[in-house]
Image (spheres, rainbow, N blue to C red):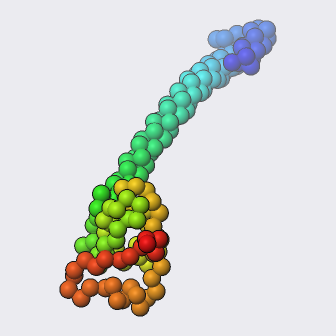
Amino acid sequence: MEKIAYLKGLLDGLNIDPASNEGKVFSGILNALEDLAQQNLELEDRVAELEELCDILDEDLGDVEELLQDEEDEEDDDEDSFCDYCTGDCGSFDDDEQYETICPTCGECILLDERTLEEGETVCPKCGEELEFDFDESELEALTPDDGEILIAQDDDAE
């Protein structure tokens, strides 16, 4: 805007008659420049407002993503949560063989699945005691029921 004001001052200082052809052209050019400069300022203001709005939306979107992630984590926790009677995902016993053991610390009866036995360790859901199992494949096969009954597995730490 300062340069346009300078050009207007030059035009006035040259004493060009605004009614002459040259005066009309210069006046028209300066008016067009003023309009463009004003539109540019308005656009800069709108861009600044939009940038601010985008920052707010980005923060809000981050909050929503965080909430969704928390919900997914809670769902995952719910899926992995243990009941009072088993050490695995309750749905995992639908297709897997079930084994039963007694916690040597609290005496709680614990149901185990094959995956837990193969991993060789679990935690008692009642007292939190770490239980370790050391079965080789032949021992696991010997524990496998033929008719779907629950077998008793002995904990290595139990006496």
Residue reaching furthest to the bottom: 138
Instruction: Say whether residue 9 is visible.
Output: yes
User: Is 53 placed above or below 69 here?
Assistant: above
Residue reaching furthest to the front: 159
Q: Position of residue 151 (x, y in %)?
A: 28, 79
**Observer-nearest of 34 and 142:** 142
For image coordinates 24% across by 73% down, the residue present is 94
For image coordinates 41% across by 52% down, the residue present is 73
Q: Position of residue 155 (x, y in %)?
A: 42, 73
Q: Which quadrant, please, contains the C terminus?
A: bottom left
For image coordinates 45% across by 82% down, the residue present is 135
Can you tell which quarter of the image residue 103 is in?
bottom left
Report the label total. Answer: 0
Q: Which quadrant, please, contains the N terminus?
A: top right
Q: Position of residue 156 (x, y in %)?
A: 46, 75
Determine whether, in the image, residue 113 is placed left or right of residue 120: left
User: Is 146 placed above or below 40 here?
Assistant: below
Instruction: Say whether residue 115 is visible.
Output: no
**Observer-nearest of 44 and 9:** 44
Determine whether, in the image, residue 68 is placed left or right of residue 41: left
**Observer-nearest of 32 and 127:** 127
Q: Position of residue 142 (x, y in %)?
A: 34, 89
User: Is 112 placed above or below 127 here?
Assistant: below
Can you tell which quarter of the image residue 41 is in?
top right
Determine whether, in the image, residue 133 is placed left or right of residue 37: left
Can you tell which quarter of the image residue 90 is in?
bottom left
